[in-house]
Amino acid sequence: MLAWLFGCLIAGIIVYGVVPTIVIRKKRVLLFREGTAPDCLALTFDDGPDPYYTPKLLDLLKKHGVKATFFVVGRKAERYPDIVRRMVEEGHEVGIHNYRHISNWLVPPLWLDWGVRRAAAAIERATGQRPIYYRPPWGHFNAWAPIVQKRYTTVLWTHIVGDWNAKLGAMELFRRLKGALRGGAVIVLHDNGDALGADRHAPEQMLSALELLLKDEAAKKMRWVTITEMRNAQTNKRISSM
């Protein structure tokens, strides 16, 4: 009996979550994942805000004049609205990363809809701006996700470098980040380490590696932009080529 129930659960997850994820990613349904401008890169940060690491990250980005896009967890945005407000005040963008950091494979339809709306409301209360971007945790979708995608631009990535693993080390992470330096890249990093599978203090090495990257001569030649700026850059490129 237990084996039968377990089998039904796995089959349900596959039909409800895994299959839609494969289809949406492969067909790029309502997705943005990379730009076309040869000199633009987008740094994106997931899982925050964190009361310790996110302010340090914002200080680092400000020091180097870099703008980024943050996909925040709604529950944390409610807890730390001042940090979310600071993101926008310093020229960054803020998108939704669900209300709780849970795979959409395990989230019922109405719970997903409620959570995304609550996260959006928390961001708007903190910043005065309604978010327009959404990134699901782990890039997992489900059969209900296209309904959410109609209200937001869903953003994935070109490079995810494993910065949640503290055993990686700052120098290896720097090497991977440097390898991601190309026009149109959307890079994922994490300013919080409490997600499932992450090391709690991993953001410390992320900050060290990112500082090395932003001091690198190759990185200085690129334009570090928000997702909106990247999308506008490729729109302008298309217009100018007509």
Image (tube, grey):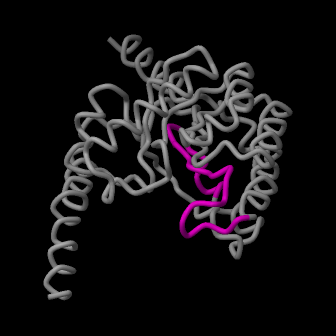
Q: Tell me where residue 63 sits by quadrant.
A: top right
Q: Is residue 43 magenta?
A: no
Which quadrant, please, contains the C terminus? top left
Q: Position of residue 235 (x, y in %)?
A: 40, 18
Give me the residue at 45% from left, 52% from top: 137
Q: Position of residue 127 (x, y in %)?
A: 63, 19
* Magenta: main secondary structure: loop
Give me the residue at 72% from left, 42% from top: 219
Q: Is residue 195 left or right of residue 151?
A: right
Which quadrant, please, contains the N terminus? bottom left
Number of on-image labels: 0
The magenta stretch is 177-200
Q: Position of residue 145 (x, y in %)?
A: 27, 42
Give me the residue at 53% from left, 56% from top: 160
**In the depicted structure, whether residue 220 falls above or below residue 104:** above
Q: Is residue 182 magenta?
A: yes
Q: Position of residue 73 (x, y in %)?
A: 55, 43
Give me the residue at 63% from left, 60% from top: 194
Q: Is residue 70 left or right of residue 80?
A: left
Q: Is residue 10 left or right of residue 149?
A: left
**In the depicted structure, whether residue 45 falls above or below residue 84:** below
User: Can you name the residue that lies furthest to the front here?
Assistant: 1
Q: Nearer the viewer, residue 161 or 217?
A: 161
Q: Nearer the viewer, residue 220 or 138?
A: 138
